[in-house]
């Protein structure tokens, strides 16, 4: 279900940002700085294990990292391949699941990243633990895992919670995107994205995409990372627009 959500969103994903190109540059610089401060410098092997259309992959490539990118959505992976060709950048792109990563067991990766609230798509603690164990098995000893996530401990539960992205203009068309959250208890919510496109001739169409999130807290994620074999957990609130959680393979 989540793969088809992101498949349908992939052609429009950049429109969720006011300026996606600026976000690539900012996130690339911020993540490269964080990795380098923790001993993973340019030239190191990074696995972006929830790459989407490449917001972090494309940025990190420009800083000299070698990136393998994977995502459960074939549509997002396909869009990233097109972005790479367009920008004359190179990275291997795969369709893969965080829970059962193909590189698990290789211990070949210096840092694994999963950014912009990707791991909360795993809806139970068992699934999160499976993903963290899989990440652990991809990493070299001492390798880093870097996650950016919403701070659900500080998120008010209001029903419905309507969150507009804003109005965007592209190729003579207007796009209006809005998120609607509907809480199902304290720990899960259903998400809808309403994406309306208005053409120059006034014709409108609206897509409604439905997904679900697990409002897992950063403390819970740290506990699960510890159980999966990670150590030296750190939280950084000044790197990206969401808190960044970093841990090291023992
Ligand atoms: C909010 S998007 C972020 C994408 C990208 N990191 C970015 O910032 O543009 C979340 C991504 O997580 C991916 N995802 C969700 N569940 C996954 C899973 N089990 N394995 C791999 N990717 C997954 C989705 O397909 C989606 O591309």
Image (cartoon, rainbow, N blue to C red):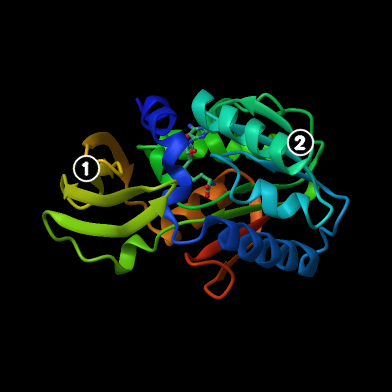
Label 2 neighbourhood size at 10 Å, few (<14), some (14-19), many (20+)? Answer: some
| Residue furthest out toward the bottom | 238
On whether ligand 1 comes within 8 Å of the CB at mark 2, the answer is no
Q: Which mark is residue 101?
A: none
Q: Secondary structure at mark 1?
A: loop
Give the image location of residue 118, x and y in percent: 47, 45
The residue sitting at the right extreme is 43
Which x, y percent locates residue 5? 36, 31
The percent position of residue 74, horizontal first and vertical second, equals 53, 24
Q: Are marks 2 and 1 in contact (CB under 8 Å)?
A: no
Q: 175 or 63, which lies in front?
A: 175
Q: Is residue 45 left or right of residue 197?
A: right
Q: Which quadrant holds residue 31?
A: bottom right
Query: Which type of secondary structure does the marked residue at label 2 adopt?
Result: loop
Residue at the disc numbered 2: 91
Whole-angstrom CA distance, mark 2 to mark 1, is 40 Å
Q: Residue at x 32, y 50 (%)?
A: 174
Mark nearer the viewer, 2 or 1: 1
Name the residue at 54% across, 36% down.
Answer: 131
Residue in view at x 26 percent, y 40 percent = 201
Residue 150 point in image, percent of width and height = 40, 59
* Residue, disc 1: 202
Label 1 Cα neighbours within 10 Å, binned few <14 / some 14-19 / many ≥20 = few
Can residue 250 be spotted in the picture? Answer: no
| Number of numbered labels in the structure image | 2
Farthest residue in the front direction?
201
- Decide: is 63 above or below 137: below
The quarter of the image holding the N terminus is top left
């Amino acid at each position: 279900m989540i793969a088809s959500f992101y498949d349908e969103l992939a052609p429009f994903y950049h429109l969720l940002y006011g300026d996606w190109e600026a976000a690539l540059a900012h996130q690339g610089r911020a993540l490269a700085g964080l990795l380098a401060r923790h001993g993973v410098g340019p030239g190191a092997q990074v696995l972006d294990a929830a790459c989407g259309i490449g917001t972090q992959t494309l940025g990190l490539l420009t800083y000299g990292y070698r990136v393998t990118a994977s995502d459960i959505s074939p549509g997002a992976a396909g869009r990233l391949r097109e972005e790479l060709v367009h920008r004359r950048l190179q990275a291997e792109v795969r369709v893969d699941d965080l829970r059962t990563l193909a590189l698990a067991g290789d211990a070949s990766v210096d840092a694994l990243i999963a950014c912009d609230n990707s791991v909360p798509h795993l809806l139970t603690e068992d699934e999160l633990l499976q993903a963290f164990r899989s990440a652990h098995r991809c990493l070299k000893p001492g390798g880093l895992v870097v996650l950016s996530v919403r701070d659900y401990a500080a998120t008010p539960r209001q029903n419905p919670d309507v969150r507009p992205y804003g109005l965007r203009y592209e190729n003579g068309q207007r796009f209006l995107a809005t998120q609607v959250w509907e809480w199902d208890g304290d720990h899960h919510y259903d998400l809808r994205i309403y994406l309306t496109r208005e053409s120059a001739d006034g014709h409108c169409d609206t897509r409604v995409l439905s997904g679900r999130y697990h409002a897992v807290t950063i403390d819970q994620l740290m506990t699960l990372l510890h159980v999966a074999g990670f150590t030296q957990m750190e939280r950084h609130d000044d790197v990206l627009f969401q808190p960044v959680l970093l841990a090291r393979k023992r």
